[in-house]
Amino acid sequence: MARVCSRRSPALFVVLGLGSLLCLAVSSAAAPAAGSGDPQAAAVQALARRYYAFTWQASPIATTENGLHTEDDRLTDFSDAADRAYGNRLRAFRNELAALAPGGTTVHDQIDYLLLRADIEGDWWQRTYLQARRRNPAIYEEECTNGLFSLLPKQFAPNAVRARDAAARMRQCARVLEQGERNLTDPVREFGVVASQEIAGADPLFTTSLESLTPGLTPAQRANLYGARDSALRALHAYKAWVDRHLPRWHAGGFAVGKEQYDWMLRRVLLLPWNSDQLAYMARLELARDRALAAWEHDHEAYTAGPIRHQPAFTSTAAFLRYYQDQTARLVAFIKSHHLLTIPPYIGAFKIVPLPAALAPIYPGGFMNPPGTFDRDQTGFYFVPNYNPSNTSFFAAQARQAVLPVLGHEGIPGHFLQFSIAYKNPDFIRRVHSDSVFAEGWAFYGEEMLMRTGLYDDDPAGRAAVLHLMRHRATRVLVDIGLATGRMTLPEAISFFARNAGIDRATAYGEATRFAMGPGQAIDYLTGKMQIETLLAQAQDREGARFSLRSFHDRLLSFGTVPLSTIAWEWFGDRRWIDRAMNPIAPIQMP
């Protein structure tokens, strides 16, 4: 999992506690032109710069994680006045963009218009229908924990500067949490449970992890940092006590947005050509296929002779982390020897680091932080859970058997490579736009692509892990749709998840609850992968004997993390996906 903002609004997803922005990709292949110079297109670009600057200022953590560092001493203002001001400004942006339709004369410019519209509409949709500010107690405590954590991984400034800003943010936690208590007029009990659980594990972030900022501080600077830390912890503990007291009176469920609104989001925000019924149908077909592949693989493993690669057991987390780092080099060597894609020379280091204990309840499988959109330091991090043979959670157990599938998903050729390439796009809108269907679809596609091209020929555990992840992602689609449309309660979704994905109930609980908070994200993996495979077939048909996987992958990444329907239009002149997204009345054929 990439700890990135994987939906439309740069601002709102920090409010939802999911971190920084996803961006675009460009590689050594030719990138799309940066615009036609059309006056209307130029107006769209100018509006985009104002809109994104506005959202970043409203969400200081997003600003930090994008590498801008102009708001590092602030947390979000959740007051009624700030909320009204944001809503009024968003409405003005929405109206201004509508007056600029269709946004230009070229395909490139018209797509830029649709990308900006998707971001603004996603922002509006989250405010209108998810209403996290009054319904989700977790967004307030996550503002405090994410606000601190975002300052820790990279030394983008001297410790004294980061410690000063961390102290300023921690002293604002009491204000943020008090605003939460006033704002939560319709809280969801299940979301309150999450908030309570997360706070229960948060102390190490403010104690152990915070110590990374202390080398070189003066006694006065240390005292300021520790005083702010103590203030933040008191506020968090008091907020947990408040949540725990009120939990019995908060209503259970009621977080579904309904089929009509969910389908609107699929079309208008994700620019998908399918509605929820069609996505569910595709997921059920894929789930059956994944079970068949697992049966074939079991038979294959039983009767295949030859040397078998086994991942070693480890005596310490440090040894486990070193193994992860070594396997990154193996992945890169395989990609180069098999000519799968071009790794540009500007790609930074990809570091494997321990997952802070405070974040383990939120990210049981770990997470990846790419470099920020405007970051000078191109280093990326993958935060790996503690190596513990007694940990039976799905992601931890999988990593003990085979680290390569998750490493390929999060690192190279997956998220880290794609995001790193993304920030080089010459078109501003495409540099800052976020489309998680492309991002997660690309990372998921890479898992099976690496298996099919031979990475796991001598590694049955690696093949088994890839197949299990395929089954897991198909189940995610059905759970996400069920929760968002109201067809499943949360307990029903957890049971369905555990049974059909073959995972433990603790992992099923964590994932299903996260999907209830942010509908739409869990469909990204399978939906994006299927679209990429469709584009691959189109490229093969068009290029014939000239086709190569490397040229296909390089060209695909050059468009950026944008809806795949826009890539089909811009690359192949195929408007069918876009037309279906724009006109839901038009007949929609299955792929």
Image (cartoon, grey):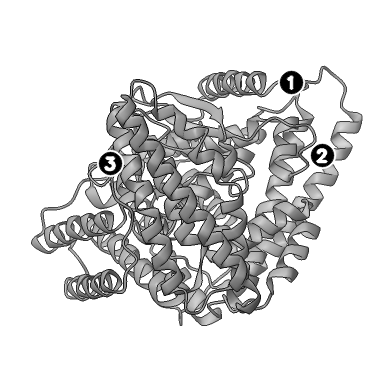
Q: Which residue is mark 2?
A: 297
Q: Which residue is mark 1?
A: 314
Q: Nearer the viewer, mark 2 or mark 3?
A: 3
Left or right side of 289 for 149:
left
Residue drawn at 52 percent across, 74 percent down: 588
Q: Quadrant of the C terminus?
A: bottom right
In this rendering, is residue 567 above or below 494? above
On residue 232, which mark appears? Answer: none
Task: Quote the CA–CA distance across marks 2 and 1.
Answer: 27 Å
Q: Quadrant of the N terminus?
A: top right
Query: Looking at numbered disc 3 in the image, what kind of residue is underneath it?
Result: Asn
Task: Quote the CA–CA distance across marks 2 and 3.
Answer: 40 Å
Query: Farthest left residue?
Result: 39
Residue drawn at 55 percent across, 34 percent down: 383
Q: Residues within 10 Å of mark 1 (few under 14, many from 20)?
A: some
Query: Looking at numbered disc 2 in the image, what kind of residue is underneath it?
Result: Glu
Task: Please provide percent x and percent y for residue 341.
Answer: 46, 30
Which element carries disc 2, helix, strand or loop? helix
Task: Quote the CA–CA distance across marks 3 and 1.
Answer: 41 Å
Residue drawn at 55 percent across, 66 percent down: 242
First in sequence: mark 2 or mark 1?
2
First in sequence: mark 3 or mark 1?
1
On residue 425, which mark appears? Answer: 3
